[in-house]
Amino acid sequence: MTTAVPARLDRLPWSRWHWMIVVGLGTVWILDGLEVTTVGNIAGRLSEEGSGLAITSAQVTGVAAALYVAGACLGALFFGWLTDRFGRKKLFMVTLAVYLAATAMTGLSFSAWWFFLFRFLTGFGIGGEYAAINSAIDELIPSKYRGRVDLIINGSYWLGAVGGALLSVVMLNTNYFPKDLGWRLTFALGVVLGLVILLVRRHVPESPRWQFIHGHGEDADKLVGSVEREIEKEKHEKLPPPAGEITIHERKSIGFGLIAKTVFHSYRKRAVLGLSLFIGQAFLYNAITFGFGAILTTFYGVKSGHTGYYFAVIAAGNFIGPLALGKLFDTIGRRVMIAGTYIVPGVLLFITAWLFDRGSLTANTLTACWCVVLFFASAGASSAYLTVSEVFPMETRAMAIAFFYAIGTAVGGISGPLIFAQLTESGVPGDTALAFCIGAGLMCAAGVVAAFLAVNAEQRSLEDIARPLSQTEKSGGERPGSGGGQTPVGGTAG
């Protein structure tokens, strides 16, 4: 089959249709941030007598958090595989439904085992969201805007974190809600917001890129045609002709063995890049956010009930970073910006560690330092998701996102806390400074890797960045190995 669908999608101007994609798919990250932050902040309330749930604070922040992380890792891998096999739309509807049901059941918890089970299932749904949605967004958004949109959407997690931090202050106030009701209503609010997103998401179409490779070429052509007519009517002008065509062998499915071989053999340097970016940002974030409450209360005497305000400020800095820097990833370019948003925050965190160790910071100035570090680091962390969602072939995209997300989440949610818990809670300034330095060092190392291996993907078609496995030799487009020195994959995936 010869098609111009990719070129037709990439030459579209920004429109109301694209806004619908962003709202329908991207806003779930806000729910994720709201969910994780809220649970962390209500841990103390859940352990109090009269909360309606027999559970300790350590179980909420330890066992329940670990199960949420495990669920996210497994959900990403499971739903990522299904997304590449059965399509983006089916799976991003299923994963949101799983999230909504599990969140609702969490709010009805009557026992610790029930709470643990549905925290795991909530993570399972959220992990699947990362794979299904990142692949769909990158395939639907024009190449000119892909970088900034992807960064801002992934960074919107922190907008939810701001809401979660402030919401917990209100919902846990016993002047407004009883002890056994306020925390349940926070989960109910998440369900309500998720249902609103579900209503919008119904109108988000299947990825035409997925359709034409998996034997639905006519549906892809019809869908893109309807979008083109809608946009021409909105803009009151004719669209320019598409830049080119590709020829592919339509396939119903791609074997897991071929996916693994493609990602880890044919694109091994890009795989090293993806792992470096995810591990670097995971350790930096855990060095700061995992023990931020303990650091503020231990070293500066901040009341535990007031740490939510500090976290809201840090979360705001995290969201502003991708919002302000996102456009530069499409203009200055991926290599410079990815390397910069890893190395700069790493260096700044080294400086913060030095100032902290010598006692030069207060609670406010330390928070200010964190905000500056995370302003850059948040854009870098979001660029990790952008990178793995655009530098591998179409047929492997969701599974690649799932794998690297699972590795990053496992490192951040398991290894990070084990390493940083004792360092940040010991009460010794040198130990906490060491935690900062570990995160900073790995972040800088990932930035150096990006400086050498990052792919110049800005404003380029996904098919040009990584040739589809189903594409034939007579098609135009760049061979898979370009931009990173990888061994090319054979043109025809038989």
Image (cartoon, rainbow, N blue to C red):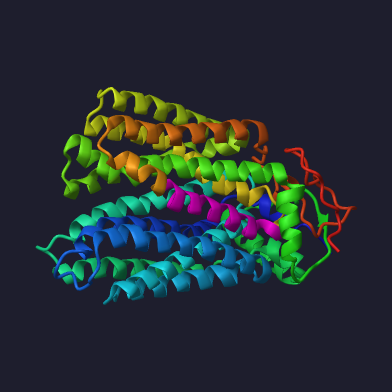
229 to 146, vertically: above or below: below
- Return the residue nearer the eye: 170 or 241: 170
- Return the residue nearer the eye: 80 or 432: 432
Residue 68, image x, y percentages: 41, 62
For residue 216: magenta?
Answer: no
> Which residue is most to the right?
474
**Residue at (57% x, 60% y) in the render:** 131
For residue 396: magenta?
Answer: yes
Q: Is residue 222 left or right of residue 277?
A: right
| Quadrant occupied by the N terminus | bottom right
Tell me if residue 477 can be seen.
yes
141 to 253, vertically: above or below: above
Number of numbered markers: 0
**Residue at (71% x, 64% y) in the render:** 256
| Quadrant occupied by the C terminus | bottom right
Residue 249, image x, y percentages: 84, 64
**Residue at (17% x, 40% y) in the render:** 302
Q: What span is in magenta?
A: 395-416
309 to 73, vertically: above or below: above
Residue 225, image x, y percentages: 69, 64
**Residue at (75% x, 55% y) in the render:** 261
